[in-house]
Image: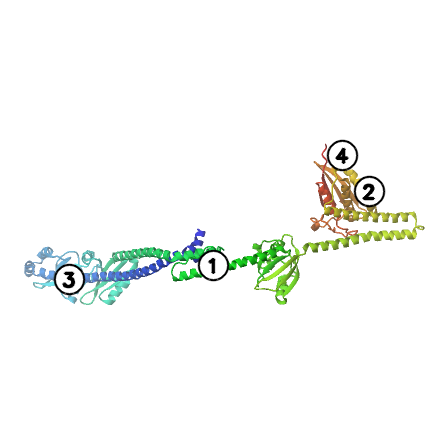
């Protein structure tokens, strides 16, 4: 549902770039017809509704007027009826003879109104029909004459009537009365063609305000009639007030006509107009489709030809057809096609030459525009930066190269060689880039001045050269330092020996010779490690397989390292079980592993402490370890502990210089070649432990 709502604007207003000209021409014709036809229909329907509204008001107003005229005629008929009764010989004779008791039957026989009566001044002599407020009738007749209208006091039904003299002594009168009730309203409804309601004027004055109250007020104010459409009741209503000859308001005649009686014919006409508009719209769509096909066919052919040109297909010629403007456009596009063929051939030739040059050079080359956005990248630069050409083109060069910040600022903002070359003509800068998988890299970027909005930069990768320089300087410095210290000690011992060879006691001479031995052992170990590192680096380290007992390896290593342990008053404890399996390996190499680990423990363990060597069996593997009571390597250095030229550092100052940083690297290389593992950690007792795991020899 949500997806449909998102697509609703696209459905209502399609993308012009994806909609055909035929569709637009058809849509334009349809919109024009709908606007014209809809406008005419809307205007005509509005006029019809207005006319129907006026017609409805006129009909109910005419019905109210006719009903009021019928009431007037009823008054005249009542007068005629009264005179006819008065002229009856029987009534005249009975009145003249004074036989008043005989009057009611005769009166009832000839009375054709709601009620008839014979009155003597204000006394009722004879009466027929329903009860009537005869005193009010007498009063109204006295005020209005022979024809009168009255409002009875005991019921809210207006009356009209008339009287005629009957004679006799004292003189009598014959009264004829008609009630303006629902029965009379039904009779008037049948005559006038609209629903008629007769309302006592007193009902209007005492009733609450409703939808008809403004109509009644307008009719009374006008004095004749008023008509309105009562939308809340869906009727047309008219009201005509009825006044007595004395000017007193007696009744209100209300006529009602349902709105549907008028609107049905109007809606029928509106439907016919809508059907006509839809028919015209369909014809317009058909005509628009035919016209669109005729007009759009040449344009479609030009569009297809232009698409082929845009895709690089210059082989097909441009069709020249259609109206005059389309023909001119086709001929112009044909000329453009020929020019493009010539120009494209030249450009491709030059592009091939440029790509051959850029692809053949060793350095990376990239070009940027005025905003330092990369527009071209040769394969060498892409490999150097670890990106593809598609990933780099269109991006800011600083985001691709990612030069390392200096003093919290990017070089792009402070000393960019591209900007410097724009002012000086050319510029060169050494940049440390964090781009690519082997980041960071050190490059020398040479930037040329901009030409035609493009500026070319040449990158030369000096990462390996710089690393070699740093490694060379570091190794030379370490070797110089490491060799100078024991040589200086040996030179001092030799000078003391030469000076006191005849005078020094034997114990002192032995101490000096022992010092010379220790210095020689240390130099020998340094030289062995350095040579071993060179052999490892060159791939010349070979393992000769033989059965080796770890106890013998420990004894050989102990004999080589014992003078160093004695110097620092350290004690070596060995715990190797007698039934320890043999391992398959190179005994001299494994001895070198133990020597390096014991020398490491000797260097970092406190003086007078215990260095422990142990071994145990774990399944098909032999585990050996060297423990010392030194502080151990820093936690942050644990991952790079066995790296080449990594010089150790613990939580306490080292008792001796750190060395070349080759010992543990050689240990790992030799153990790896024996299909084993080496690791470092801390024991529960707080000791530093280097653990070797080697596969046990499988018995034949």
Question: Which residue is depicted at the point 16% across and 56% down?
Answer: 130
Tell which circle, 1 or 3, labels the residue nearer the N-terminal end. Answer: 3
The nearer-to-camera label among 4 and 1 is: 1
The nearer-to-camera label among 2 and 1 is: 1
Secondary structure category for the residue under label 2: helix
Question: How far apart in space, not on screen, are marks 2 and 1 (Cα)?
Answer: 91 Å
Q: Which mark is residue 579?
A: 4
Tell which circle, 4 or 3, labels the residue nearer the N-terminal end. Answer: 3
Q: Position of residue 587 (x, y in %)?
A: 77, 40
Residue identified by numbered label 2: 559
Q: Nearer the viewer, residue 295 or 216?
A: 295
Callout 2 crowding tier (Cα within 10 Å): few <14, some 14–19, many ≥20: few
Question: How far apart in space, not on screen, are marks 4 and 1 (Cα)?
Answer: 92 Å
Question: How far apart in space, not on screen, are marks 4 and 2 (Cα)?
Answer: 23 Å
Q: Residue furthest right?
A: 502
Q: Position of residue 497 (x, y in %)?
A: 90, 51
Q: Is residue 261 left or right of residue 530?
A: left
The nearer-to-camera label among 1 and 3 is: 1
Callout 1 crowding tier (Cα within 10 Å): few <14, some 14–19, many ≥20: many
Residue identified by numbered label 3: 73
The nearer-to-camera label among 2 and 3 is: 2
Total number of numbered discs in the rendering: 4
Question: How far apart in space, not on screen, are marks 1 and 3 (Cα)?
Answer: 99 Å
Callout 4 crowding tier (Cα within 10 Å): few <14, some 14–19, many ≥20: few
- Look at the image and tell me in which quarter the C terminus lies: top right
Q: Nearer the viewer, residue 291 or 344?
A: 344
Q: Is residue 371 left or right of residue 640?
A: left
- Tell me, yes or no, whether the two marked residues, 2 and 3, touch with CB atoms within 8 Å: no
Question: How far apart in space, not on screen, are marks 4 and 3 (Cα)?
Answer: 147 Å
Residue identified by numbered label 1: 337
Does residue 346 appear in the picture of this structure? yes
Question: How far apart in space, not on screen, are marks 2 and 3 (Cα)?
Answer: 154 Å
């Amino acid at each position: 549902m949500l997806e449909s709502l998102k697509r609703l604007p696209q459905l209502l207003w399609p993308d012009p770039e994806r909609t055909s000209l035929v569709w637009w021409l058809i849509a334009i014709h349809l919109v024009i017809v709908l606007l014209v036809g809809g406008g005419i229909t809307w205007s005509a329907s509005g006029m019809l509704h207005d006319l129907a509204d006026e017609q409805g008001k006129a009909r109910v107003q005419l019905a109210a007027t006719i009903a009021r005229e019928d009431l007037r005629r009823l008054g005249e008929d009542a007068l005629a009826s009264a005179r006819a009764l008065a002229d009856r010989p029987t009534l005249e004779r009975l009145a003249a003879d004074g036989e008043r008791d005989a009057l009611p039957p005769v009166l009832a026989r000839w009375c054709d109104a709601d009620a008839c009566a014979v009155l003597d001044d204000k006394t009722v002599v004879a009466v027929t029909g329903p009860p009537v407020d005869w005193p009010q009738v007498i009063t109204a007749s006295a005020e209005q004459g022979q024809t009168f209208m009255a409002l009875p006091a005991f019921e809210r039904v207006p009356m009209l009537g008339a009287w005629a003299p009957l004679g006799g002594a004292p003189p009598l009168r014959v009264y004829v009365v008609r009630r303006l009730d629902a029965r009379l309203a039904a009779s008037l409804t049948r005559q006038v063609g609209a629903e008629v309601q007769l309302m006592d004027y007193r009902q209007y004055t005492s009733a609450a305000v409703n939808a008809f109250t403004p109509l009644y007020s307008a009719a009374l104010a006008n004095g004749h009639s008023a008509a309105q459409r009562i939308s809340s009741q869906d009727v047309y209503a008219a009201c005509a007030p009825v006044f007595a000859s004395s000017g007193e308001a007696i009744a209100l005649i209300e006529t009602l006509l349902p709105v549907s009686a008028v609107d049905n014919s109007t809606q029928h006409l509106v439907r016919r107009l809508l059907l006509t508009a839809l028919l015209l719209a369909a014809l317009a769509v058909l005509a628009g489709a035919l016209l669109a096909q005729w007009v759009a066919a040449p344009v479609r052919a030009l569009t297809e030809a232009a698409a082929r040109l845009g895709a690089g297909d210059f082989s097909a010629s441009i069709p020249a057809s259609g109206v005059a403007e389309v023909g001119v456009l086709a001929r112009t596009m044909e000329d453009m096609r020929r020019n493009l063929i010539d120009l494209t051939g030249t450009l491709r030739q030059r592009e091939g030459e440029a790509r051959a040059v850029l692809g053949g050079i060793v350095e990376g080359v990239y070009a940027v525009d005025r905003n330092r956005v990369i527009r071209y990248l040769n394969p060498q630069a892409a490999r150097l930066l670890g990106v593809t050409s598609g990933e780099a083109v269109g991006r800011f060069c600083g985001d691709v190269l990612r030069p390392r910040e200096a003093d919290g600022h990017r070089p792009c903002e402070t000393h960019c060689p591209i900007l410097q070359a724009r002012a000086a003509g050319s510029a060169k800068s050494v940049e440390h880039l964090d781009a690519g998988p082997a980041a960071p890299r050190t490059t020398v970027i040479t930037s040329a001045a901009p030409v035609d909005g493009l500026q070319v930069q040449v990158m030369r990768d000096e990462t390996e050269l710089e690393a070699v320089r740093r490694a060379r300087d570091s190794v030379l410095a370490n070797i110089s330092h490491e060799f100078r210290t024991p040589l200086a000690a040996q030179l001092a011992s030799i000078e003391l020996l030469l000076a006191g060879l005849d005078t020094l006691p034997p114990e002192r001479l032995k101490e000096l010779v022992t010092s010379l031995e220790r210095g020689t052992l240390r130099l020998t170990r340094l030289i062995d490690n350095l040579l071993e590192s060179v052999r490892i680096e060159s791939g010349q380290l070979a393992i000769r397989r033989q059965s080796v007992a770890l106890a013998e390896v420990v004894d050989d290593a102990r004999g080589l390292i014992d003078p160093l342990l004695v110097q620092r008053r350290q004690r070596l404890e060995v715990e190797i079980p007698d039934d320890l399996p043999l391992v398959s390996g190179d005994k001299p190499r494994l001895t070198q592993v133990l020597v390096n680990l014991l020398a490491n423990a000797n260097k970092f363990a406190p003086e007078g402490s215990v260095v422990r060597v142990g071994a145990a069996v774990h399944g098909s593997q032999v585990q050996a370890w060297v423990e010392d009571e030194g502080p151990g390597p820093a936690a942050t250095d644990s991952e790079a502990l066995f790296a080449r030229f990594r010089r150790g550092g613990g939580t306490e100052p080292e008792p001796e210089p750190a060395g070349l940083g080759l010992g543990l690297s050689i240990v790992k290389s030799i153990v790896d070649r024996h299909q084993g593992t080496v690791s470092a950690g801390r024991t529960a007792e707080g000791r530093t432990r280097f653990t070797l795991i080697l596969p046990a020899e499988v018995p034949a």
